Image (cartoon, rainbow, N blue to C red):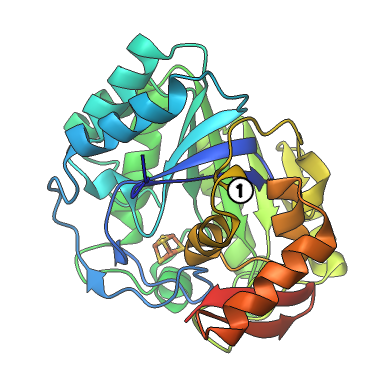
């Protein structure tokens, strides 16, 4: 079966070997973040509907999971905001009912959590990771460029509601953009709000892949260390590079059948280095470099030099 909505398994900084599930078409989101790895938002919306039929996604999951691949997480995410898909509850419930041995994570920007129906839909997940970069509207607009109807009050109210109703883990991801949300003023307000939410962990993230906006620059270790100190004693972790948390027992993989297609499928969602692809595939690096060279020659993929090395992306 060719998978249209599943990608990976890919090594993730926080989720180990993770099977990604795309719930919305490229690129449907309530935000247009300046650091987005997927590129510019083409459908900026807050309308919840079944963008991709839940049954189509479930059919792919059933097929993939029937061989019981070794995975650390199944993550509902993809090329936009997954909670926009009205079928998310059906998918989470199906996974927990028929594949209960797998942990399910939802990666959200938190904009729709004020909707009680959504919280009911996702309360069987094991982890909900909410990205929250600021607690004031000015910084939210500068970094996340939200849909006109989205404001920080609604986002904070939604996250508090989630905390009150969700029994499993809530992780907060804070994307640090130097010069925008690393100042004492922005961080003080954020710290006050975070202390009300009491998240299980706060991950400090920084750009290490091409973002959608040239002005979004990576945060240095020094800046990340400063932000960490500022937010302590809350449980804050600076996220390490891709390699750090990887479990290489990656089970079934498209690399066995069509390695070129597998590379394209991975970098379509997230631009990656050759080393990232080596970790995902378990293939030797010289083989991966040859495959990459072939794809470049066919003009299917391009490259961009970043701090962490050469990243490949689909043209
Ligand atoms: S980073 Fe996430 S929330 Fe921001 S635009 Fe990209 S998909 Fe949407």
**Residue 177, percent across and down?**
63, 73
The residue at the far bottom in this view is 214
Q: Residue at x 17, y 51 (%)?
A: 51
Q: Residue at x 32, y 28 (%)?
A: 122
Which picture quadrant has residue 274?
bottom right
Q: Secondary structure at mark 1?
A: helix
Q: Is residue 122 above or below residue 48?
A: above
Q: Write down the residue under mark 1.
A: 255
| Residue 210 visible somewhere in the drawing | no
Total of numbered circles in the picture?
Answer: 1
The residue at the far front in this view is 257
Q: Is residue 278 above or below residue 142?
A: above
| Residue 73 visible somewhere in the drawing | yes
The answer to whether residue 48 is left or right of residue 76 is left
Which picture quadrant has residue 53?
top left
Q: Quadrant of ligand 1?
A: bottom left
């Amino acid at each position: 079966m060719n998978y249209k909505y599943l990608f990976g398994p890919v090594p993730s900084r926080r989720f180990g070997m993770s099977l990604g599930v795309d719930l919305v078409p490229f690129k449907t989101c309530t935000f247009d973040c300046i650091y987005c790895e997927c590129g510019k938002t083409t459908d900026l919306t807050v309308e919840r509907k079944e963008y991709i039929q839940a049954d189509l996604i479930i059919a792919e999951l059933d097929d993939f999971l029937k061989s019981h691949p070794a995975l650390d997480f199944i993550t509902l995410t993809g090329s936009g905001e997954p909670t926009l898909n009205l079928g998310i509850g059906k998918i989470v419930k199906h996974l927990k009912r028929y594949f209960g041995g797998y942990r399910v994570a939802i990666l959200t920007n938190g904009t729709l959590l004020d909707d009680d129906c959504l919280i009911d839909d996702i309360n069987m997940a094991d982890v909900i990771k909410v990205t929250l970069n600021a607690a004031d509207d000015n910084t939210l607009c500068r970094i996340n460029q939200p849909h006109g109807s989205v404001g920080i009050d609604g986002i904070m109210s939604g996250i508090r509601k989630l905390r009150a109703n969700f029994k499993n883990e809530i992780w907060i991801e804070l994307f640090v953009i130097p010069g925008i949300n690393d100042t004492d003023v922005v961080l003080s307000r954020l710290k006050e709000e975070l202390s009300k939410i009491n998240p299980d962990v706060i991950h400090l993230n920084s750009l290490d892949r091409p973002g959608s906006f040239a002005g979004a620059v990576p945060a240095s270790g020094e800046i990340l260390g400063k932000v960490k100190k500022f937010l302590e004693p809350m449980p804050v972790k600076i996220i390490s590079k891709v390699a750090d948390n990887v479990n290489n027992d990656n089970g079934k993989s498209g690399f066995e059948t069509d390695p070129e297609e597998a590379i394209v499928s991975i970098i379509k969602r997230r631009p990656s280095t050759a080393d990232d692809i080596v970790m995902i595939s378990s293939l030797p690096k010289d083989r991966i470099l040859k495959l990459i060279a072939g794809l470049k020659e066919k003009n299917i993929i391009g490259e961009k030099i970043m701090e962490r090395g050469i990243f490949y992306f689909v043209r």
